[in-house]
Image: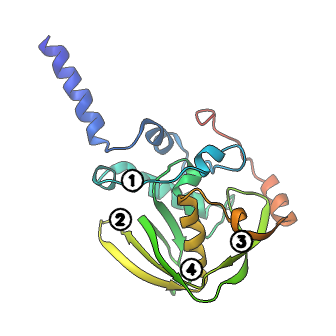
């Protein structure tokens, strides 16, 4: 009896040490390749349309978070995707995590933002071209604000409130929409097939992993 209790205690401790990730989230983080499968419409609409939740302390302190951020970075920068931003729902995790290329900084770094929320938007909305890794091979024209104030946590847990302008502000709006289950096509004035992107995508092998289905 004591032996059974000890084994059960070890199992509970192991699960607790992994943080508060759901079984599905752990599967996505662990079983994904270094370049993750990116959810696409309409096949993965259940994930892409679901609202995302903040990370709690257990997840913020977990090794799984570091693995997820590293895999999201490699996915975003891989030639098969080659994007300027990515949100966690796009890789199957409905948490408020985005990676954004900061065009407003000298080296244009790609940075992670945890528990991100948009506090305010201002300025005259202007139309601009947009695409999305989850809506290939389309492009559209979307009206966005030129300025945004965001609140988020850095990976080390430091809370930050920041004002961002220009193209980076557009990317933040696009990625934060993903966290609320909104796609750029919902806001677009026009949507059209981008033939060059369609041809490029056909040159890559892109299939849904068996474990995802």
Q: Is residue 35 visible?
A: no
CA distance for labels 3 and 2 = 28 Å
Q: Which mark is residue 168?
A: 4
Q: Is residue 103 visible?
A: yes
Residue under numbered circle 1: 65
CA distance for labels 1 and 4 = 24 Å
CA distance for labels 3 and 1 = 28 Å
Would you identify the image quadrant in which residue 144 lies?
bottom right
Q: Tag 2 or tag 4, which sits nearer the N-term?
A: 2
Q: Tag 1 or tag 3, which sits nearer the N-term?
A: 1
Q: Secondary structure at mark 3?
A: strand
Residue positioned 53% across, 59% down in the render: 179
Residue positioned 83% across, 59% down in the render: 198
CA distance for labels 2 and 1 = 9 Å
Nearest the camera: 32 or 192? Answer: 192
- Label 3 or label 1, whichever lies nearer to me, is 3
Nearest the camera: 145 or 163? Answer: 145
- Label 3 or label 2, whichever lies nearer to me, is 3
Residue under numbered circle 2: 155
């Amino acid at each position: 009896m004591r032996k059974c209790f000890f084994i059960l205690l070890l199992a509970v401790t192991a699960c607790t040490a992994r943080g508060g990730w759901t079984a599905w989230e752990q599967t996505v983080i662990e079983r994904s390749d270094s370049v993750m499968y990116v959810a696409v419409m309409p096949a993965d609409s259940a994930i892409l349309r679901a609202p995302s939740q903040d990370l709690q302390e257990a997840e913020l302190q977990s090794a799984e978070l570091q693995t997820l951020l590293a895999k999201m970075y490699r996915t975003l920068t891989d030639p098969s995707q080659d994007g300027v931003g990515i949100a966690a729902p796009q890789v199957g995790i409905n948490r408020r995590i985005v990676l954004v290329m900061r065009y407003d900084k000298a080296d244009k770094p790609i940075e992670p933002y945890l528990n991100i929320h948009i506090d305010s938007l201002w300025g005259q909305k202007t139309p601009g071209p947009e695409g999305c890794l989850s809506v290939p091979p389309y492009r559209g024209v979307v009206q966005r604000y030129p300025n945004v104030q965001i609140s988020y946590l850095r990976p080390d847990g430091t809370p930050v409130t920041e004002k961002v302008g220009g193209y980076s502000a557009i990317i933040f709006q696009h990625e934060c929409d993903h966290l609320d289950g909104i796609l750029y096509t919902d806001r677009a004035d026009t949507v059209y097939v981008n033939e060059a992107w369609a041809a490029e995508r056909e040159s890559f092998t892109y299939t849904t992993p068996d474990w995802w289905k």
